Image (cartoon, rainbow, N blue to C red):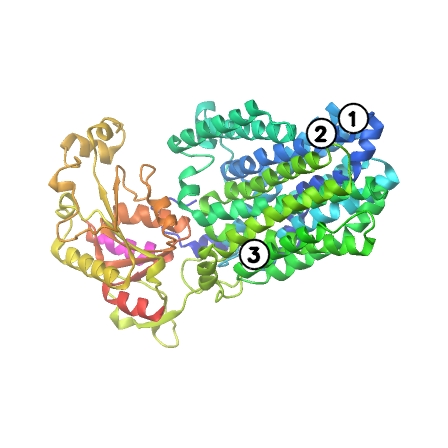
Amino acid sequence: MPSAGDTRTPERISEAGAPRGNPFGARFVAPLYLGASLNPVNSSIIATALVAIAAALHIPVGDTAILISSLYLTSALAQPAAGRLAEEFGPRRIFVAGITLVLVAGIVGSLAHSLTALIVARVLIGAGTSAGYPAAMLLIRRRAEQAGHAAPPREVLGGLSITGAATVAVGPAIGGLLIGGAGWRAAFWINIPVAAVALFLALAGIARDPDPLRFGSPRALASRIDLLGMLGFGGSLTALMIFLDALPRLDWPALAAALVLAAALAGWELRAAQPFLDVRLLVANGALTRTYLRNGLTLMGTYVILYGLTQWLEVARGLSAYQAGLMLMPMGVLTALAARVVSRRAAVRWPLIACAVLLLVGAMATLFVGSGTPIAAVICVTAVFGLTSGAGTVANQTVLYQEAPAAALGTASGLLRTFGYIGSIASAAITGTAFHRGVSDSGLHSIAWVLVAISALVLVMTVLDRQLARADLHHTDQPPAGARNPGPAPSTEPTRAEPTRTEIPRTELPRTESRSADMTTGTHTTPALDPARTALLLMDFQPVVLGAVPDPQGVLARAGEALAWARAHGAHVVFVRVALTDKDAAAVPAHNKTFSQAVAAGYLTDGTAATAVHESLKAEEDDLTVRKTRISAFASDTDLRAELRARNVDTLVLAGLSTSGVVLTTLRQAADEDYRLFLLADATADPDPEVHRVLMEKVFPHQAEIISTADLAALSTAAQ
């Protein structure tokens, strides 16, 4: 990653490492799809083996449910953990390590002769396969950046969803075929050849992680990955699984432990410097949190049918594992078809509503399924759930990509799967409760009533989610994903819409600005502004800073003009100021040259007139004021990131003092987090005019649109 002073353009950096030919060809995507499919196929393939395993080990069928829940629990813990590790150590390294672990697990399961050994194998499978999806998401994003694409092609992300969704549904059919012909051990040894092929393809087709592997001290490493947060998350989920696994008996101590550990986890994560589970983000970003809940509930409903109906077909209808698996094959086919159709659409609201409606229809249809129901009718019911699974998986992944912070995409992707596995654990508990006295029609109908309630809740959540409609409004006009960005700084956000554009004559630009131009017309093409999703950041307009820059009154007057524009057009306003309390000053280390000198001089003391926002820039009730103790507005001690997410802001207009200080650090951080950026050149200044000129001409145009305050009105009008 280039340093703050690196003046190389993103295009040159990208081109240097860009893959030749099609960057998303089969050689690259094949190992990703295969690796990402290992988890869902292992989740479902075991469904047709449970009866055979129970018979071989001479245990009740109900006891084999732990083979389902153990993998789900491990996966629920390991998915976000693998995402965090991929962010920290490199996605290729974690991807390869995960596949290697699956290979080992396949050998352990193939040689097992006890339920305990099978549980160990399933835990290893859960841990190893969990690396596939979050690492693949990071690798796809990195590939798009290297190729200079504005976004990964939709079919690539869609293919990742299709692979996962389809393998969940066809798993029982594959399992039935394997187990019917080779016995229950096939559910384990099949991982050996598949993992070996995936490992070979990954080593041959995925470029090495560019950053060197670094660990540091054990304490520093634990802090970077938030080891305590991971352990707290794991403890809470384990207690919850114990409670669910005990149903219909109510294990109150387990439930109490789950709640206490969850509360302790939330408290810890609020204080953690790099939280594993960003509680503030989940609270502030309602769209992302609702996506997690919606995905978990939808998969809960799908898995209830997947496991419950499979057991009912084998026991109540007397079908073999092979026959039961074949009956679920149409479900898998329709899952893949629905996922493919939805992956080609930019809109997500109506696919999610359709998904919820289909889930409700399937649940109500299951109420009429019984021992005398024709097989064709049962297949039709499963087909409805296939459509639900395919549409829901792809649409929820799209919303995740829209809402998740780019810097935490691996962890966020893992959490999406985690909520799915929590739903799957709950589905196993529902199935076990319904069939605890034996597999029967009445038990299947009990499952169906629970499913009716789940689907109704999902439908209400989706219909009332206004953010989905707003997101569609901003993304339906998006150009084809994978197209190269015409601007100087390619965005890596694949689902953000390309806004309308307005033409600004070059003669209007200040001399110090350097912006891309259409060489045939002599005009500059600048994205228009949507004020409702835009925040104006007025940074460090404080007397203590104003006194160090040339023409302070002029730059202050133009900041006032920008503020008036924001008020008139309904844009969000954020005042950023730097100030230190006594506690902050005491925490500044001597080796911090900038702030140690400020502490010694005492000119950044909070509560003084010198550190207040200049009196000409009046704050209003709805404005946000951010106090920071370091240079960047996104410093770790501010809530700016969460506040912007809460306001659904995806565009920033920056103005501040000084150009080489808060403007430089904030702009670089915001660019890395995929905000659309506009920099007001005439409302920005630096003590050194030459530094200001170099940054404006040589550095900033590669991350932001350089405009003047006079351009704001035209840009916001063009968006209407």
Q: In the displayed structure, does residue 83 sit left or right of residue 368? A: left
Q: Nearer the viewer, mark 3 or mark 2?
A: 3
Label 2 vs 1, first from the N-terminus: 1
Q: In the displayed structure, does residue 617 sit left or right of residue 237? A: left
Circle 2 packing at 10 Å, graded few (<14), some (14-19), many (20+), is many
| Residue at horizontal 58 percent and vertical 45 percent from the top | 297
Q: CA distance from mark 3 to mark 2?
A: 35 Å
Q: In terms of secondary structure, what is the magenta stretch mainly?
A: helix
Label 3 vs 2, first from the N-terminus: 2
Q: Nearer the viewer, residue 473 or 17?
A: 473
In the rendered image, residue 206, in percent from the top left (x then y), is placed at 61, 46
Looking at the image, do the residues carrying marks 3 and 2 touch, with CB atoms under 8 Å apart? Answer: no
Amino acid beneath label 3: Leu
Query: Residue 352, labelled with which disc?
Result: 3
Q: Nearer the viewer, residue 369 or 144?
A: 369
| Residue at horizontal 30 percent and vertical 61 percent from the top | 706
The residues colored magenta run 690-700
Quadrant position of the N terminus in the picture: top left
Say whether residue 172 is magenta: no
| Residue at horizontal 75 percent and vertical 32 percent from the top | 437
